[in-house]
Each structure stands twice: as structure tokens, then as C-alpha cells.
Image (cartoon, helix red, strand yellow):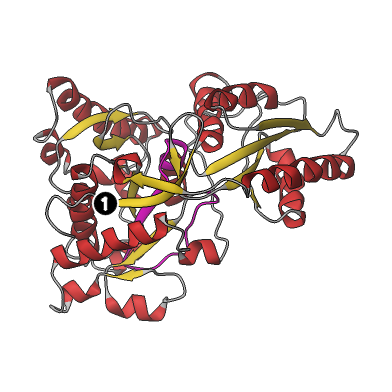
Amino acid sequence: MKENEKLTFYGYRRPDGSVGVRNHVLILPTITCATQTAQRVTELVHGTVTFIHQHGCAQVGIDYDQTFRTYVGMGANPNVYGVIVLGLGCETHQAKSVADEIARTGKPVEVVTIQENGGTLQTIAETAKMAAQMVQDASTVQRELCDFSDLIVGTECGGSDACSGLSANPAVGKASDKIVEQGGTAILAETTELIGAEHLLAQRAADDQVRKRVYEVIEAMENRSIQMGVDIRTGNPSPGNVEGGLSSLEEKSLGAATKSGTSRLEEIIDYGKRPTKKGLVWMDTPGHDIEQLTGMVAGGAQIVLFTSGRGTPTGSPIAPVIKISTNTAMYERMSENMDLNAGTIIEGKESVDQVGELIMKEIQAVANGKLTKAEILKQHDFGIWRIGPSF
């Protein structure tokens, strides 16, 4: 990548002005009781995607709000052409309410409920008919030339090892800085795994309000475990992290923070919310891989960079996830799941800057349509960060 070179890709321009790198029709189940029905529809109709979950009913207060926001965010994500919101009918998260919010983006939205349609089989048939027509309509949309300023790229690490903070994570940090330089947005997440490194991020805060918020979200995350009477460090670092050479949460956090590069921290947003500013943004999420991935995609991320030292098949139903290994041995062992190898940094064969450039080229290729390993293997993971009990 040449200095000051403007990067472009061919994407799908949506009615609200956002740009997708994929063109999915999403069958969105608002309640766990509807997930299997949604799955049957995706098996019948090519071009549709869905996800299995355990949410959507008996949730109240801020927990209800967060799940609702996540549903809407998944449907509103630019990688989705249109949505069929599928409900049971009696749940607290009503399908029509979710559909109405998604429809604000201007994309096609339909609503189907199992109880009103007379049961599972009739609902599958009705939804499949709608989906088939929506997929055909989606197939007529042409890609057009777009700038990297249209991209929101999520970053995360899972199954970290002693190499994470030395190879893949700082290389992702280089890519993150380049995305910001291009006028795009990079999301840093995993609040749990930033404990001990918060002072470094606070030093890069855009203003005093953001700087204060850095310490607030870290304190809130630590207080959750204290209120439960548990030590957050009994689960983080995980057994795999320890076996991979990480000695403490603070050591893990110092490595995880390098994914943010050196850019100024513009804002901190709540889980599943879309950034209001361009540049580096911190989303307050847990360290749980699937929950943080879901939060960033619900926040509008069209592509996610995911580093791993231990290896993971993790993916998203609607956003391509580029998997980057921290060491060559794991890359070779799990090549069917990993897209890039940053282990060459450890071996002295490539620099952090060079691997950062490779990551940027991969982002551009994936934005143009190249499938990631997780997409090819249909790794459609989904999980919402629960912040309250069910009633």
C-alpha cells in the first residue's frame, strides 16, 4: 500500500447510504422457539442465513433493551439485503417491533409468526416463499465502487497465547491504524481483556469525557464479578491461555490492547450500538468470543479481524471473519480454519508492518467478495451478552 493511496472495493450500497460486503437475506428469529423453524427455511432457500440462540422471552429492563438492540442491529447490518423477522407470537420481543426498527434503514422487511400461521410446517412454507422472492430481488443488486471510509472493521482475539501480543495483535493494530487513516472505523472490544491496560487507552482518548469513560467501563466490568462474589481472573486467562504461555489477565490485556494500534480513541459505545464517529471506537463487550463478535456485527461491522494462538473456527452468519494465527505451528495444524499466518513475525521472516499490509490486502479482497474459511465452513455463531436474569 502506497502512502496516501486511497483504497477502494466493490460493495452493495444500501438505501440508508451504508455499504455491505455481502448480500444476505436474513431469517431473523426473535425467540428461541422460532430458531429451528428459521433453520429449516435456510435449508430450503439458497442465499438465506439465520442463527440459533436462547433469547427473546422473559427478559426485562436493560437486558430486554440490549437483546432488542442486538436483533435490530443484525438486521440493519449493511451486509444484509433484506430481513424476514420470524417470531412465535407470544414472546416479549415481538417480531413486529423488531421489524419496524429494521425497516427504518429502507431495506425490505417482512414479518411472520408461527402462531398466526397455524404451526411450524405452514410457517416454513410461507417464510420460504417470501425468502425465495427476496433472494431473487437481492440477486439483481450490483456492486459499485466504494471507499474504505464506508467500512466498519471489528477486531478481536480468542484463544490467545504468548505470541498474540507479539505478532498477530500488533499486526492487526497496524491494519486498524490504516483503516482509520482511510477514513473508516475500527472497533476495539473485549473490555474484560483490557483490564490492566486501560491507562494506555486513556492516554489516547479524544477528550476528558472519553478518558473518564475508559475507567468507568473497566470499573463496571470488575464490579460485576465482585458483586457475584467471584474473581474474574479465575476465568480469564482461560486454561488454554495459560497453557499457551500467558501468566495473568494483565499480560493478556497488554497484548490485546495492541489490536487498537496507535490511533486516537474517539468514543466508547455500549454493546451492539453503532459508532457515531469515524476512527478508533471501543465497544464495551465481555471477553466471550461469540458475544463480542455478535455485538460488533450488531454495531454495523461488515468485516471482523480475529486473531488466535490456540485456534478457533469462530464465524458470523452475516459478517466475514478473517482468522489470523499468532504462530506458524497452529496455522499449519488448523489451516482449514485460519486465513492468514502472523507466525512469520515470530520466526523473523516478516515484520509487523509487512503482516499489517497483508491484512489490509485481505480486507480488500474479502470486501470484494473473497470468502473466508469461516464462511466456507458455514460457521454461523451467535450469542448475546446477557446482563440480567430471565423472569
Q: Is residue 30 left or right of residue 195?
A: right
Q: What residue span does the magenta drawing correspond to? A: 296-318
Residue 332, position in %: x, y? 36, 81
Q: Residues within 10 Å of mark 1 (few under 14, many from 20)?
A: some
Identity of the residue drawn at 27% across and 58% down? 360
Residue 267, position in %: x, y? 24, 29
Between 255 and 102, the one lying in front of the other is 102
Residue 200, position in %: x, y? 11, 41
Residue highlighted by disc 1 = 7
Instruction: Check residue 306 for magenta coloring.
Output: yes
What secondary structure is the stretch in magenta mostly built from?
loop
Between 262 and 82, the one lying in front of the other is 82
Identity of the residue drawn at 14% across and 63% down? 353
Instruction: Point out the image quarter for the N terminus.
Output: bottom left
Q: Is residue 6 visible?
A: yes
In this picture, is 379 found above or below 150? below
In this picture, is 23 found above or below 96? below
Q: How many marks?
A: 1
Identity of the residue drawn at 62% across and 26% down? 98
Kind of element beneath mark 1: loop
Identity of the residue drawn at 41% across and 76% down? 335
Q: Is residue 250 visible?
A: no
Q: Quadrant of residue 208?
A: top left
Q: Is residue 132 left or right of residue 67?
A: right
